[in-house]
Amino acid sequence: MAHEKETIADKDAEVVASRHDEGVIPSADLASDAKNAADSEHRMTLLQAIKTYPKAVAWSVLLSSTLIMEGYDLALVGNLYASPMFKQKYGVYDPATDKYVISAAWQSGISNGARAGEIIGLIIAGWTADRYGYKMTTIGSVLLLVGCIFILFFAPNIQTLVIGCVMCGLPWGAFQSVTPAYASEVAPTVLRPYLTTFINMCWVIGQFASAGVNRATVNRTDEWAYRIPYAVQWAWPIPILAGLVFAPESPWWSIRHNDRAGAKRSLLRLTSRNQPNFNADETLALMEHTNEMEKRIKEGVTYRDCFKGVDLRRTEIVVGIWLVQTLGGQNIMGYFTYFLTQAGMDASNSFSLSMANSALGIVGTALSWFLMSRVGRRKIHFVGLCCQFTILVIVGCLSFGTTRASVWAIGGMLILFTFVYDLGVGPVTYSLVSELSSTRLKAKTIVLARAAYNASNIFVNVMTNYQLSSAAWNWGARAAFFWAGSCLLSCIWVYFRLPEPKDRTYAELDILFERGVSARKFAKTKVDPYESEVSEKRLSSGTA
């Protein structure tokens, strides 16, 4: 054992020596500068962070806005199932109801086609983001989406529509992996939860826009009732591309590629000049120290490394957090309009309520920022999930009502569900997955987690389509009981497995995971990732 420790020490000494020969800061000095930067981040208030990193906020918002497109597109699929002209074009006539319907099988094909495409897009983006950076991956994905929208717009039949959804899923998957990673890496600790949870707001804004466009076209009696909603998708890419061309790369990405000069250029483009509490070199030292510390813990940065040692637990947690999103009943929000029409509400009113639903979701996400500055992510997530369980049980009970009032009550409870979700589980998830994965494996961990999310969504979409379709099980609002059960299981998992990352630097989180600290003790455990190296520097200075 002693021999092994000496060998490890020798290797670390060789690394430090080689870095010193290359003109890189020695390990002890690096740790000292990193500690100064970490202490500065801990002292930094929200207002100071905004003054220091205003351009980081702007660039993060720009990249996150790609999720407006995905939120719009995915909500569009569920909303169009309630459009009479869409069903007439792509559905079949049902003599029993005297209406056109799209079978549960084809609904699953459309929804799951998009999810399958997203999984492929995620895997590709995980590789391209590591190799070419977040910026180029996003630019390529936006360009691909512009072309794929043509397939949806001109689809002559439902088979082509499925192909279009699969193809659009490729760039959507890329957006899912790149945006949380970029948002978490361009800003200090105090800004991380705001920028990562803004991603959820972009989703909700997209859903609101989708409901609004559908509400405006639902009463049309021609093909433009569904072509206009598809055409609106072309409105997003041009302004986003115009900004992306000038966006800086993440400085963490440059550090991982041993490009300190590039990292400094990016960092200076993300920050304001002459800020009294900011030192660019110390901030870079914090990134380098964290990167070196993670390299000492594990050398690899492949998908296989996500399942080794300490990172196995981190991967399980990040994957689990996103699976909870699908199993907590949030799928009903995506089918909000269709859900209400199946419960007996006319299409026009259901689209109006869907807009109110999304608007309240935006309010909920904004309030979550206020909540996260005072309450831990773990507590917000767990309490929010428990509230979702309660609402789902109430919706299931209301399904036994036969009056019009009960249908409106179900609509009201689902709006409340959206508010609770977008106040808690929805936005906090993006903050958690960005913080709990290691910096070196962040892109790949998010890819694996989001791929698991999309894979679980395939199951969820199939179940939901069959539960709600009048041509299948026709459960209506009683489907809420099923999702209440899966939500309860999610609550149990969160209580025992989800740790608290609030106010922690990435280096501190690395130490907590390396020591195997229990999820319920993360918030109270004190760690100092720089203590030993800084002490060595002090001793050497004293003996000099």
Image (cartoon, helix red, strand yellow):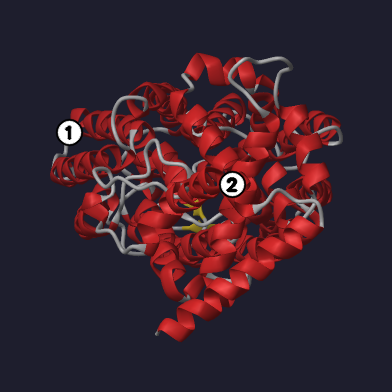
Residue at the disc numbered 2:
544
Q: Nearer the viewer, residue 300 or 426?
A: 300
Among the 4 quarters of the image, the one containing residue 229: top right
Q: Position of residue 237 (x, y in %)?
A: 78, 36
Q: Position of residue 369 (x, y in %)?
A: 41, 25
C-alpha distance separating marks 2 and 1: 86 Å
Q: Quarter of the image containing the N terminus? A: bottom left
Say which residue appears at 49% left-offset and 48% top-offset.
539
Asked which secondary structure carries label 2, the reply is: loop
Q: Nearer the viewer, residue 488 or 133?
A: 133
- 63 relative to 539, above or below: above
Residue type for callout 2: Ala
- 148 relative to 117, above or below: above
Residue type for callout 1: Thr
Q: Nearer the viewer, residue 18 or 288?
A: 18
How many neighbours does mark 1 have within 10 angstroms: few (below 14), some (14-19), or many (20 or more)? Answer: few
In this rendering, the label closer to the viewer, 2 or 1: 2
Q: How many dots with numbers?
A: 2
Q: Position of residue 85 (x, y in %)?
A: 61, 42
Say which residue appears at 71% left-offset and 43% top-offset.
250
Q: Pick whichever of labels 2 and 1 is earlier in the sequence.
A: 1
- 494 relative to 8, above or below: above
Can residue 47 be seen by looking at this rendering?
Answer: yes
Say which residue appears at 51% left-offset and 39% top-offset.
35
Say which residue appears at 53% left-offset and 48% top-offset.
543
Q: Which mark is residue 403?
A: 1
